[in-house]
Image (cartoon, helix red, strand yellow):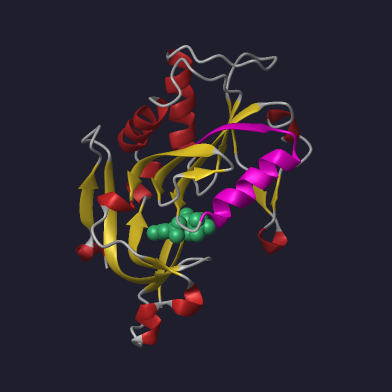
Amino acid sequence: METRAVKIYSQVNKNVVLRVMKGHFATTHSHINYFMDMTGLKSRLNEAKGAASVLARKYENTTIVDTIVCIDGCEVVGAFLADELTRAGVMSMNQHRTIYVSTPECHTGGQLIFRDNMQMMIRGKNVILLLANVTTGKTLNRALECIEYYGGQTVGISSIFSVIKSARGIEVNSIFTEKDVPDYMTYETAKCPLCQKKVLLDAMVNSHGYSKI
Ligand SMILES: O=C(O)c1cc(=O)[nH]c(=O)n1[C@@H]1O[C@H](COP(=O)(O)O)[C@@H](O)[C@H]1O
């Protein structure tokens, strides 16, 4: 599958590259015809830093940010985003005058929780939610509910790739959209035309990557 990867370069920073693979893939919430391989963007220092610098442009000098909540394994990008915002003079109103980078635990049944020792990073805090992929928006909405439940205020949403433009009135700040990926499609699992044509799935995918089936 790796040989089928195509590189898509960010319009604003050519060092930020999304690798996509065409095929038939199942996520937790939909079927898609491109797998977004975020491995490099999430784990290589220079790529993660590049992604963070693109995402930071949205928030520089405009927003108070106390905490970045990372979903989809985006902690490295999250740490660079915190650094970029701090350098740009973004204020943190919490006691320690710094930005927390945090991830909820995915509990049995997919519920997102913050343990007691983590909740101070969310309660009464200004939060940026950071994801790798937003397709149906179900994962995004679950994360927003989690932040709200623990008393945080989401002041921004960022994602490396997003099909969704806004959630709960907040714009999704993304580096790539479906317009960057020619003929990108997402289908409700039960109505997937590839399944109807008996096209076998290439892989099950989630934020960790893919497993061929
Ligand atoms: O559908 C995706 O968002 C998705 C595309 C992809 O290529 N790889 C991948 O892991 N996903 C994951 O699928 C999950 C479902 O996204 P939503 O449909 O927006 O809830 C998210 O956790 C994404 O990270």
Q: Is residue 207 visible?
A: no
Position of 94 with respect to 27 (left or right) is right
Q: Position of residue 73 (x, y in %)?
A: 50, 47
| Quadrant of residue 22 within the rendered picture | bottom left
| Quadrant of residue 107 within the rendered picture | bottom right
Front residue of 197 and 74: 197
Front residue of 51 and 139: 139
Q: Position of residue 54 (x, y in %)?
A: 34, 30
Which residue is most to the right?
A: 116
User: Considering the image in quadrants, where does the C terminus appear?
Assistant: bottom left
User: Considering the image in quadrants, where does the N terminus appear?
Assistant: bottom left
What residue is shown at x 34% (from left), y 55% (from top)?
Answer: 37
What residue is shown at x 48% (from left), y 74% (from top)?
Answer: 189
Task: From this view, report whether residue 158 is shown above or below residue 190.
Answer: above
What residue is shown at x 43% (from left), y 14% (from top)?
Answer: 87
Q: Is residue 197 visible?
A: yes
Which residue is most to the bottom?
A: 198
Confirm whether the magenta stretch covers residue 144.
yes
How many discs mark residues in the rendered view? Answer: 0
Front residue of 211 and 16: 16
Position of 19 with respect to 144 (left or right) is left
| Quadrant of residue 91 within the rendered picture | top right
Q: Position of residue 200 (x, y in %)?
A: 36, 83
Position of 213 with respect to 70 (left or right) is left
Task: From this view, report whether residue 64 is shown above or below residue 27.
Answer: above
Confirm whether the magenta stretch covers residue 181.
no
Residue range (magenta): 137-157
Which residue is most to the front?
A: 169
What residue is shown at x 25% (from left), y 32% (from top)?
Answer: 12
